[in-house]
Amino acid sequence: MLKPPELLETSRLLLRLPVLEDTEAFFRKCAQDREFAKYLVWQPHENINVTRDFIHRCIHCWQDETAFPWIVVRKNDHELVGIIELRIDKFRADLGYGIAPEYWGNGYATEITKSVIAWALLQENIYRVWATCDVDNFASARVLEKAGMQKEGILRRYILHPNVSPEPRDSYCYSVVK
């Protein structure tokens, strides 16, 4: 199995392995926030124990190589700003990300998405990097476009975003290929 580096660096940000010490900051800035969780597949975390379990899952994903979530921190002060995850399936990889609402509008999502795409496409065996976003998530669609992805179409009733609707929602599918 192909395994990404444990640390990726952009001009302003570090993408690093999650550690249990991230629990409090991730809970406070991201996991309990309704706006952060709006287009995710899980509800906002009701308490820090749910977030601790989530961080444990992130750590174990790296260990069993089922997914590769990085915690995103600013270089200058190591403040947690979000998370991005890459999942590799043979010759393709998909990604998802979330930025803490207090950092929206700074270009961080585009910066980390470009970085992960660049790493993935440098790998000999990865030919496609793709992502989806809810058809109403205009900000995420813009991030994917600015990161160099092209909209392929709509995946009808593709994913359940329980914070938006109890029924599966349509999603745009974006990709970049080599």
Image (spheres, rainbow, N blue to C red):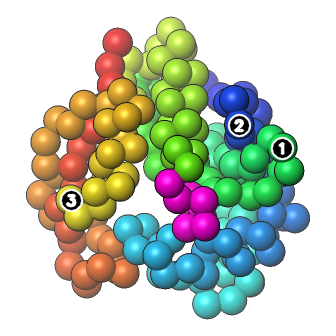
What SS does tag 2 mark?
loop
**Residue found at the far front of this picture:** 105
Where is residue 18 shown, x and y percent of the image?
A: 76, 53
Residue visible at 57% across and 22% down?
A: 119
Circle 3 crowding by C-alpha within 10 Å: few under 14, some 14–19, many from 20: some
Circle 1 crowding by C-alpha within 10 Å: few under 14, some 14–19, many from 20: few
| 3 or 1: mark nearer the eye | 1
Residue visible at 43% across and 67% down?
A: 40
Rendering quarter of residue 48: bottom right
Q: Is residue 5 left or right of residue 33?
A: right
Residue visible at 67% across and 30% down?
A: 10
Where is residue 110 shown, x and y percent of the image?
A: 49, 40
Determine which of the numbered discs, if any, sits on residue 12 in the image: 2
Circles 1, 2 touching at the beta carbon (< 8 Å): yes
Report the span colored magenta.
98-105
Q: Is residue 172 magenta?
A: no
Q: Residue at label 3?
A: 135
Circle 2 crowding by C-alpha within 10 Å: few under 14, some 14–19, many from 20: few
Can the viewer see residue 58 in this picture?
Answer: no
The Cα–Cα distance between marks 1 and 2, rounded to whole angstroms, is: 8 Å
Residue visible at 67% across and 57% down?
A: 81
Q: Amino acid at mark 2?
A: Arg
Determine which of the numbered discs, if any, sits on residue 76 in the image: 1
Q: Amino acid at mark 3?
A: Val
